[in-house]
Amino acid sequence: MIPPLLLAGTFAFMSIRIAIIEDDADMRLAFERAIREAGDLDLKGSFPHAEAFLARPEGLDGLDVVLSDINLPGQSGIEVVAQCKPKRPRLQFLMITVFEDNTNLFSALCAGATGYLLKTATPAEIAQAVRDIHAGGSPMSLAIARMVVANVQQKKASARLVESLTPREHELVRLLADGYRYKEIADRLALSVETVRSYIRAIYGKLQVHSRTEALNKVFDR
């Protein structure tokens, strides 16, 4: 007879239930192997594209973590996150990709992904990342973490540059953002065109940019 405490402990243990979305067959098999060999992870499905995952008969039920590529045929992994996260807020999405660019990184995080790994991650790193994300963490490859830190530092530096603008310079920037030309700005502010040019040169110098587009991107954090 199994002791009551041992029986209770057996039923208390719950594997982390995972689905994989990856279009590369070899990579998908590698992810499946990493999950199956972990012991405490339960692979509930493996799909070659987003549409197959979204057509899963049981939907999002019975899943704790989704391990998804970003660059998929059809809908991207980011679109999957954006579509599924509002329906199941507790479902965690761990993106695993070859992309190291800021656009994909922050698009994935803004869509609701909680972790981000590169495909160079080892099977042990993938399994541990799944455990971490299920436990409430936000696992990231070191290269990705450095990108996040660098981006935060860059935003802080840009904010300091923007704060250095005078009220008049902020006014000129807003007019530039509204599409006004130098002559139109001069007329609105009762200035000469040359004075407007001098202001713009000073603004570019303070913001460390060389064009209207760069200046607006920095001021409005585009």
Image (cartoon, rainbow, N blue to C red):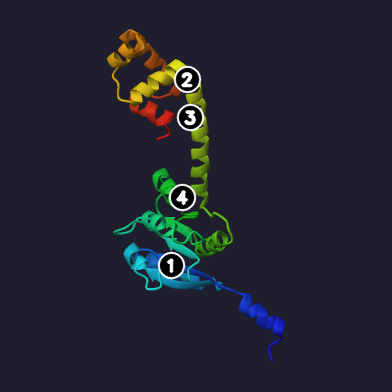
Mark 3 burial class by Cα count in 10 Å: few <14, some 14-19, many 20+: some
The residue type indicated by label 2 comes to Leu
Q: Taking 176 as reference, is 116 above or below it?
A: below
Which three-letter amino acid code belongs to the residue tagged 3? Ser
Q: Is residue 131 depicted above or below 179 in this figure?
A: below
Picture quarter with the C terminus? top left
- Identify which amino acid the numbered label 4 is placed on: Leu
- Residue 109: assigned label: 4
User: Which numbered disc, 1 or 4, marks the residue closer to the eye?
Assistant: 1
Which of the pair 117/156 is nearer the observer? 156
Q: Which mark is residue 165?
A: 2
Residue name at image x 36 percent, y 65 percent = 54
Q: Position of residue 41 (x, y in %)?
A: 53, 71
Circles 2 and 1 in contact, beta carbons < 8 Å: no
Which amino acid type is marked by label 1? Leu
Residue 131, above or below 12: above
Residue matched to label 3: 158
Distance in Å between CA atoms under marks 1 and 4: 20 Å
Q: Nearer the viewer, mark 2 or mark 3?
A: 2
Quadrant of the frame with the N terminus: bottom right
C-alpha separation, residue under disc 3 versus residue under disc 4: 21 Å
Instruction: Give how far apart the Cα atoms at labels 2 and 3 are.
Output: 12 Å
Identify the element where label 4 is drawn. Answer: helix
Q: Where's residue 30, x and y in %?
A: 43, 67
- What residue would you read off at disc 1? 60
Vertically, is 96 above or below 186?
below
Pointer 4 local density, CA inside 10 Å: few below 14, some 14–19, many at least 20: some
First in sequence, mark 2 or 1: give its number.
1
